[in-house]
Amino acid sequence: MPQLAINVDHIATIRQARGGAEPDPVHAAAICELAGAKGIVVHLREDRRHIQDRDVHLLRQTVKTRLNLEMANVKEIVEIALEIKPDMITLVPEKRKELTTEGGLDVIGNAKKLQKTISKMSKAGIPVSIFIDPDAEQIKASLEVGATYVELHTGRYCDAENEKERDQEFRLIEQAAELSFEKGLRVNAGHGLDYRTTTRIAAIPFIEELSIGHAVIARSAFVGLDQAVREMQGCIDRAGRI
Ligand code: PXP
């Protein structure tokens, strides 16, 4: 079964709404780990709309599992990553006006820039994942630019409007996971996964880690973060019975 990594960006979003110190994503990360999460994910956006530099520095010191830094491939953030040395980074496309990361990264169109960053990360011992749509050409390009992992975008599967569409999107992810693995890439997945959509994805062989944020943080408002993480872990565990 894949391991569960929790994205705590939304905790920082609530904090930023009042500009104070609470709730603290560093505190949230510790609760997630104690509830069984095997990784913590944060996205340090260029506009710093939620996670702040201070959060990433503190998380580097406090996270006991694995810290995955999501980031755009831009000089400022690349320098921060090289200084902080997260356990891995995930390169994502970033647009100022988007509410959340929209599509996967166009690896083919950005190959040169990606290669340069991946080579710097590799010298610093930081494995790189690239967030991509479940597409064979993007998978091949990810291998060519030197990525260690791909994170397969599950958003279209989660947002499908009917079962037929959902099945089609599911098959694309399943095939992409298999192709990535065959090519020697390690495979993560995420985006939009919730308490209904996670189990089926978790049953796909080859996927090592699921990165989940919104659904867990939203549910935590009603049941608490510890329980919300445990329930999501339950969704992953149920994949073993499919
Ligand atoms: N993976 C990537 C690359 C993301 O950008 C995000 C959102 O920050 C996630 C996973 C988690 O998505 P969600 O918050 O919808 O679970």
Image (tube, grey):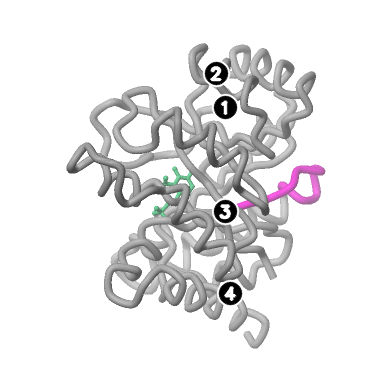
Segment colored magenta: 180-189
Q: Amino acid at mark 4?
A: Ile
Q: Is residue 155 above or below residue 158?
A: above
- Tell me, yes or no, whether the two marked residues, 2 and 1, touch with CB atoms within 8 Å: yes
Q: Is residue 190 depicted above or below 218 in this figure?
A: above
**Quadrant, the N terminus:** bottom right
Give the foreground label among 4 and 2. Answer: 4
| Between marks 3 and 4 in the image, the one whose residue lies nearer the viewer | 4
Name the kind of residue labelled 2 in the image. Answer: Asn
* Circles 4 and 2 in contact, beta carbons < 8 Å: no
User: Within 10 Å of the Cα at label 2, are there few (<14), some (14-19), or many (20+) other Cα atoms?
Assistant: few
Distance (Cα) linking label 4 and label 2 = 34 Å
* Residue behind mark 4: 236
Residue type, label 1: Val
Query: Given this view, does label 3 or label 2 mark the residue nearer the observer?
Result: 3
At which x and y percent is residue 19?
21, 37
Q: Position of residue 160 (x, y in %)?
A: 34, 63
